[in-house]
Image: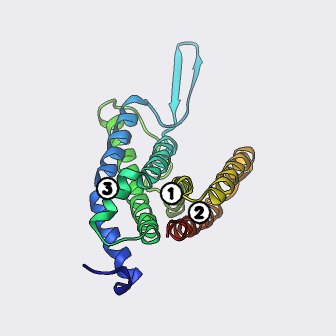
């Protein structure tokens, strides 16, 4: 039997990332199903308005990524929490692992899945637009045919942020009480502050918002690793 001390952390994490990415592939399937369901149920993922005068009636529907992004973000949050549950941690026994290496591997998987989620989200959005264009035969005024890189980065950072918060929350519940309570309180305070200042935050340029989201994500990832390490020490 191999010992953890004989294998570098990098090698362990690399093996775990490959293992987890393949093992949890069903999570991506659930996202595809969710996106299709919301794409079918919602006549539009944006706002609708109309104008009428005499016998003339015109209705405008604005199609955007908003609803698809919301679904993807909450999916990332739930999946990240599931990664920290006992059922998923049992799978770590299939490879040489520790709580710290498992936490690092989960972070890499969340980042990879966030990128794939953006691809799935964009693909579903374009399929929805194509369906409306060909099946419903509605007239379109296309502002931008291709989604800008800044929007793609914003989508990725948003999904990654929710995944990071999910990992931190799930890991905190498994950590020592002295760490668990302050982290959960800080998360609640952070969510409250964001909710209060949401309108001001949305007024910032997309690139600035993405940088803020990525910074908070990195902070959550670092706290996740730290809690996992402390949990391992307390377990010993």
Q: Residue visible at 53% across and 60% down? A: 157
Mark 3 burial class by Cα count in 10 Å: few <14, some 14-19, many 20+? some
Using the numbered discs, state the Cα–Cα distance from disc 2 to disc 1 in whole angstroms. 8 Å
Q: Nearer the viewer, residue 148 or 137?
A: 148
What element does badge 3 sit on? Answer: loop
Q: Are marks 2 and 3 in contact (CB under 8 Å)?
A: no
Q: Position of residue 92 (x, y in %)?
A: 34, 63
Is residue 147 in view?
yes
Q: 64 or 226, which lies in front?
A: 226
- Can you name the residue that lies furthest to the top here? 54
Q: Is residue 104 left or right of residue 133?
A: right
Circles 2 and 1 in contact, beta carbons < 8 Å:
yes
Which residue ends up furthest to the front in the rendered image? 236
Label 2: element kind: helix
Q: CA distance from mark 1 to mark 3?
A: 15 Å
Counting labels gives: 3
| The N terminus sits in image quarter | bottom left
Give x and y (percent) for residue 18: 30, 69
The answer to whether 215 is drawn above or below residue 42 in the figure is below
- Residue 26: percent from left, percent from top: 29, 50
User: Label 1's element?
Assistant: helix
At a point 53% along the width and 18% down the height, the residue shown is 56
Which one is earlier in the sequence, the residue at label 1 or at label 3?
A: 3
Tell me if residue 226 comes above or below residue 187 in the rendering. below
Q: Which residue is mark 2?
A: 220
Mark on residue 24? 3
Q: Which residue is mark 1?
A: 167
- In-front residue for pair 185/129: 185
């Amino acid at each position: 039997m191999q010992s953890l001390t004989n294998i570098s952390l990098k090698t362990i994490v690399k093996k775990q990332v490959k293992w987890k990415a393949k093992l949890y592939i069903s999570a991506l399937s659930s996202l595809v199903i969710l996106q299709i369901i919301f794409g079918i149920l919602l006549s539009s993922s944006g706002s609708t308005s109309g104008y009428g005068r005499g016998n003339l009636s015109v209705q405008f529907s604005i199609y955007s990524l908003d609803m698809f992004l919301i679904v993807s973000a909450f999916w990332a949050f739930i999946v990240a929490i599931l990664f920290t549950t006992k059922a998923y941690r049992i799978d770590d026994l299939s490879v040489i692992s520790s709580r710290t290496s498992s936490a690092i591997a989960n972070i890499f998987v969340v980042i990879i899945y966030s990128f794939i989620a953006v691809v799935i989200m964009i693909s579903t959005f374009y399929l929805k637009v194509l369906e409306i264009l060909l099946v419903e035969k509605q007239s379109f005024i296309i502002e931008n045919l291709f989604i800008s890189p800044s929007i793609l980065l914003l989508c990725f950072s948003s999904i990654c942020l929710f995944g990071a918060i999910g990992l931190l929350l799930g890991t905190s519940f498994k950590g020592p009480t002295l760490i668990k309570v302050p982290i959960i309180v800080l998360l609640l305070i952070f969510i409250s502050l964001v909710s209060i200042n949401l309108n001001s935050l949305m007024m910032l340029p997309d690139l600035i918002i993405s940088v803020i989201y990525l910074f908070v994500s990195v902070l959550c990832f670092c706290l996740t690793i730290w809690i996992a390490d402390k949990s391992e020490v307390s377990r010993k």
